[in-house]
Image (cartoon, helix red, strand yellow):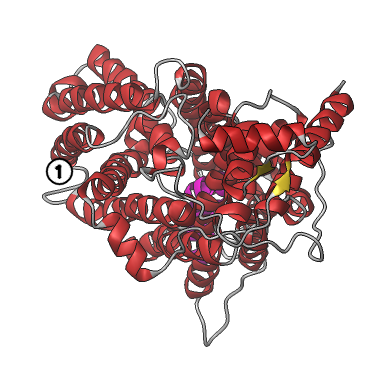
Amino acid sequence: MPPEAEKNHTNHNNGTNAAITAGERRRAALAEVNEAKFSRFHVKTCIVAGVGFFTDAYDIFSISIVALMIGYVYHQGGSNTANQDLGLKVSTPIGTFVGQLLFGWLADHVGRKRMYGIELIIIIIGTLGQAVAGQAPAISIYGVMIMWRFIMGVGIGGDYPLSAIITSEFAARRIRGRMMAAVFSAQGWGNLTSGIVSVITVVAYKNEILSEPLTDLKGIDQAWRIIIGLGCVPGVVALYFRLTIPETPRYTMDVERNIKQASQDVDTYLTTGTYVVDPIHNTERAEVPKATWADFRRHFGQWKNFKILFGAAWSWFALDIAFYGLGLNSSTILATIGFGTYTKGTKQLQMYQTLYNVAVGNIILSVGGLLPGYYFAMAFVDVWGRKPIQLMGFILLTIIFCCMGFGYHAMLATSPGSKAFVFLYCMANFFQNFGPNTTTFIIPGEVFPTRYRSTGHGISAASGKLGAIISQVGFNRLVNIGGKNAWLNHILELFAFFMLTGIFSTLLLPETKNLTLEDLSNEDQTTFVHDAGIPAVPEEVTRISSEHRTLHQL
């Protein structure tokens, strides 16, 4: 008999039990999370994270009609200048870019739980600030709105890495993709709700809009403030649950190095949905790799790790150039289907009907392409995998944008061609969401080690927002070269080019379906924890704890 086996045999015969090391305890706790059955705790996690994305989308997409209303009010029935309109719309993406990088880094260094909810507070404050913004001789309404929308954008940016990472780290291996897709799909409902609220508000103020003089558009002024202000309601409802959600066991183990507390958290939240922090007894600190600048360079200095970060970041960048660029051209689509600017009757009637058309048109576009795409992605993301869906999306989007760009003038010259153009627009929306718009959110939440997972997601998301800023600033200037929308066909051709680059960046990414986050970290898990100096737990204690948990579940 080998010496080690003989030693264990002797211990067993003497009535003593082998000890469970910290590394083994970590692997056992992670296995319990990875193989857990879908439970109420998972549902709660999806809802709490999803409400944030619902709020984000509502606040982002409602600006399209709100900017139109602000133009009417502060230009006495006129419209914003190009720079004023751009400032209102681009301030949020710039703030989001900052928030994604900042909160991505903070969540890895301060903790997911400590930061979760703070970004929602920032969104609520920024939203309320917009709703009560005013103008004075010394300051313009546009300057005030841009400031508050930037602040709100910082909070929205923080929501991306935090919600993605918390969902992925609590999710079981088999359902992780569906949980993250469910969270992200809340964006579609936020977009749709902003259109519904806008329609209801505009109709409610119909009499005021039609009867008020252009020098005193009080009804429209109240309407846009209500539309903006209602955006903070779901955030307020979700705030308590975000502030009380437990820290993820992976962060507790791999960053705080407290394996005992993490094991206890897993035991409690999988059975009762609660958790108890015991700072007196749970003070063990394991030796695990620490997040430092030198370690960051060492990890991502290896091609096998850097290519994943680059692939995730570029894929999101390329996608958002087209995703937000397509949104800039929705007015063309709305006009084609009869929901464009209204030009008949009095000025007051024109304003009312235009606002109504924009709101209803956005609802049609949301239902026609956005929402179905999210749920197709949710249905297939754990069956086909993330990489095939992203590749399929980029390939089809390349083809669709080529057709829309090179065939732009020919299609819009005839009635059947215009209908075909609208159909392609809806298909572009559909395959963005049943494609890279969803998977570029999911993959960065899975492929990085715990100590850099939020930072990596923040970098990837910020790259996407950089693409959105380029769309809203650069392409907004290019599109009108030579006349209104004269360059639109070339813009669509550029979108096709960026979709083509997304195909190649996707090839750099691994398939994450059915793999644990530890498998995807590209780190050796057998030597991840150094057990030297860490008190071992008797096997008998671990067995009794497991039996107690099983009885509790029964």
- Identify which residue is drawn at 39% across, 59% down: 90
Total marks placed: 1
Q: Is residue 234 visible?
A: no
Which residue is most to the bottom?
138
Is residue 460 one of those drawn in magenta?
Answer: no
Occupied quadrant, residue 407: top left
- Identify which residue is drawn at 53% across, 44% down: 164
Q: Is residue 369 visible?
A: yes
List the residue tagged with mark 1. 487
User: In the rendered image, which quarter contains the C terminus?
Assistant: top right
Image vertical order of residue 195 relative to residue 423, above or below: below
Q: Position of residue 356 (x, y in %)?
A: 55, 37
Q: Position of residue 460 (x, y in %)?
A: 36, 50
Mark 1 secondary-structure assignment = loop
* Circle 1: residue type: Trp
- Identify which residue is drawn at 17% across, 34% down: 504
Is residue 59 one of those drawn in magenta?
Answer: yes
Q: Is residue 184 left or right of residue 543?
A: left
Q: Is residue 296 left or right of residue 133?
A: left
Say which of 252 and 187 sits in front: 252
Q: Main secondary structure of the magenta part?
A: helix
- Identify which residue is drawn at 13% across, 21% down: 410
Say which of 478 and 340 sits in front: 478
Say which of 404 and 244 sits in front: 244
Region of the chain picked out in magenta, as a range: 56-76
Occupied quadrant, residue 373: top left
Q: Position of residue 483 (x, y in %)?
A: 16, 48
